[in-house]
Amino acid sequence: MKELKLMKGNEAIAHAAIRCGVDGYFGYPITPQSEIMETLMEEQPWLDTGMVVLQAESETASINMVYGGAGCGKKVMTSSSSPGVSLMQEGLSYMAGAELPCVVVNVVRGGPGLGTIQPAQSDYFQSVKGGGHGDYKLITLAPASVQEMADFVDLAFELSFKYRNPAMILSDGVIGQMMEKVELQPFKPRMTEEEIVAKYGDWATTGRTSNRKRNVITSVSLDSEYMEEHNHKLQAKYKACEEDEVRYEEIMCEDADYILVAYGSSARICQKAVEIAREQGIKAGLLRPITLFPFPTKQLQKLAQSAKAMLSVEMSAGQMVEDVKLSVNGAIPVEHYGRIGGIIPSPGEVVDALKSNFIQG
Amino acid sequence: MDIKDIIKDENVIYKKSAVLTDNEMHYCPGCTHGVVHKLIAEVIEELGIQDTTIGIAPVGCAVFAYDYLEIDWQEAAHGRAPALATAVKRLMPEKMVFSYQGDGDLAAIGTAETIHACNRGENIVMVFINNGIYGMTGGQMAPTTLQGMKASTCPFGREPQQDGFPLKITEILATLPGTSFVTRQSCHTAASVRKTKKALIKAFKNQQAGKGTSLVEVVATCSSGWKQSPTKSNDWMVENMFPFYPLGDLKDE
């Protein structure tokens, strides 16, 4: 049964995880996302669904527990915030190499270093360009509401299993901490080993039964010919992902002269900025990427044919703007506006930036 | 008489375990890994747990351990095997799970994962091969390298002021309430090989009984890393390693 609740984005992640039949959560506390594990521990899902919840000794251990669980074909996840996610990059690279599905939630805070506990979007590069060593990508979803925090858990698992690749829910301190109403999906039972094999194939390490050879989860090979082939296979998956999985939302883009490009909490701010701009007679629109990898390149190219300019609005020093520029490829001017270090821009500031970049003088 | 007439079931008194694959091992002459692999294969066969056992391979010389035992395997990042084993066992408590790690993996880069898996009393078996050197990368100093012992990153011998002291991690792990069976064995004689096998059987049986973490350390030789012949390596191990890493059970509850 669906349920309507008022809760924080972080709490919504936890409830959604239990409801969509997640097998295991492994995490380590860090602000501003500790409510995820706290909620899970309070809910005690092991009593109802059998879901395992474990507080690990570090983010390094968490992501490697996720590797172990994923290798068994289980739906496993972790969550953290920026410094912790940096520690997970080794594990994510190994998982991409070993073709393991999992979901990692990053409730981003300002950096670099220990940085600040206030919200930021400065982990864009780390999320969409791979993050760890080697040629790989993370499927990256950017929720802009508490509802999407809940909905994207299931979606991220679906995509990560479809492509056998880690998926990231790239949130931020605003979306994680703010309270909104959320409609929780009905409970889905956890999958049995037989169901996993039937749906996703017989690759997991569940014990070598006599009707098959041993399954090995690994990312290593000393045969460079094999390794090149393996890398081509990974790249083909990412290409397929770019063809089939792009998700975005457009707000008042049809007649827009100026397109704001923003994801997550910045998109919420830009939604208001579009309203203010329109009141002032400026035809603004918003393109909100929902998937950051794969990026809505084609849609931006299309919009660049009718719009005069684009402004990438991010709580970073300018990261996504590089992908916007690559997409538009010089067809129209593209600029960046952002606040950094944990400061959240106001809609008015965004409108001012739009004017100063493209309209005045 | 043809060889085929001799190789008959009724004549067999010893044979390769069916859990061992036919792959040729990549280990150097005199290396202990092959013997321990064989023992684990025999234990898995004798306990009838081939279909339910999941091995976690390390980074180090045993990185390709999964080529040699016909069971499901996961290959971990360096030092992270106990974290993988933790999740595998917790998500599938009915399966048998063991990690197989060297000294660099278990006692240097993976110290946190090792101690915390043991401290949580994860119901797993950890097999720890201690040869006091990094074999795969070419003979660098390990956490368990003895004082005065030469390695490529302590070419004049390990000197505590510069390099720190050799780490007796097994002794540390034995103090943790989560461990139930902690033992140190070797494989340099037929008798010691049999003792190591017994220890492995006990460790796996402890897991079946839900007793928590069992750690079987095997003090091992690395002829290539130690730059000695296999026989000299065995003698050197007895003379130098055993006094600092004495054999026997440290804990059996």
Image (tube, rainbow, N blue to C red):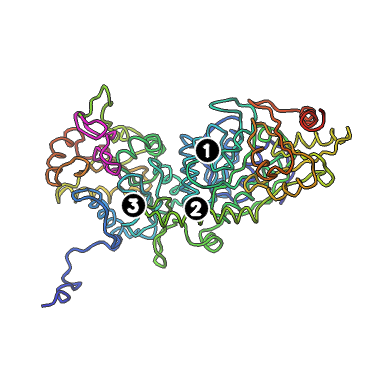
Image quadrant holding the C terminus of chain A, namely top right
Label 3 marks a residue whose chain is: B
Label 1 marks a residue whose chain is: A
The residue where tag 3 is placed is B64
Looking at the image, the residue that sits furthest to the top is B161
How far from the left and from the top, in percent, is residue B103? 30, 39
The residue where tag 1 is placed is A27
How far from the left and from the top, in percent, is residue B31? 21, 48
How far from the left and from the top, in percent, is residue A86? 52, 35
Describe residue A328's horizontal placement relative to residue A86 as left or right: right
Tell me what residue is drawn at x 47 percent, y 40 percent. Answer: A90
**Label 1 is placed on what type of residue?**
Gly
Between the residue at mark 3 and the residue at mark 1, the CA separation in whole angstroms equals 29 Å
Describe residue B114's horizontal placement relative to residue A192 as left or right: left
Mark 3 and mark 1 in contact? Answer it, CB < 8 Å: no
Between the residue at mark 1 and the residue at mark 2, the CA separation in whole angstroms equals 21 Å
Mark nearer the viewer, 3 or 1:
3
The quadrant in which residue B2 appears is bottom left
Between the residue at mark 2 and the residue at mark 3, the CA separation in whole angstroms equals 18 Å
Mark 2 and mark 3 in contact? Answer it, CB < 8 Å: no
Q: Which mark is residue A99?
A: 2
**Label 3 is placed on what type of residue?**
Phe
How far from the left and from the top, in percent, is residue A340? 65, 27
Label 2 marks a residue whose chain is: A
Dot 2 crowding, Cα within 10 Å, few <14, some 14–19, many 20+: many
Q: Earlier in the sequence, mark 1 or mark 2?
A: 1
Tell me what residue is drawn at x 27 percent, y 42 percent. Answer: B135
Tell me what residue is drawn at x 52 percent, y 47 percent. Answer: A136
Mark nearer the viewer, 1 or 2:
2
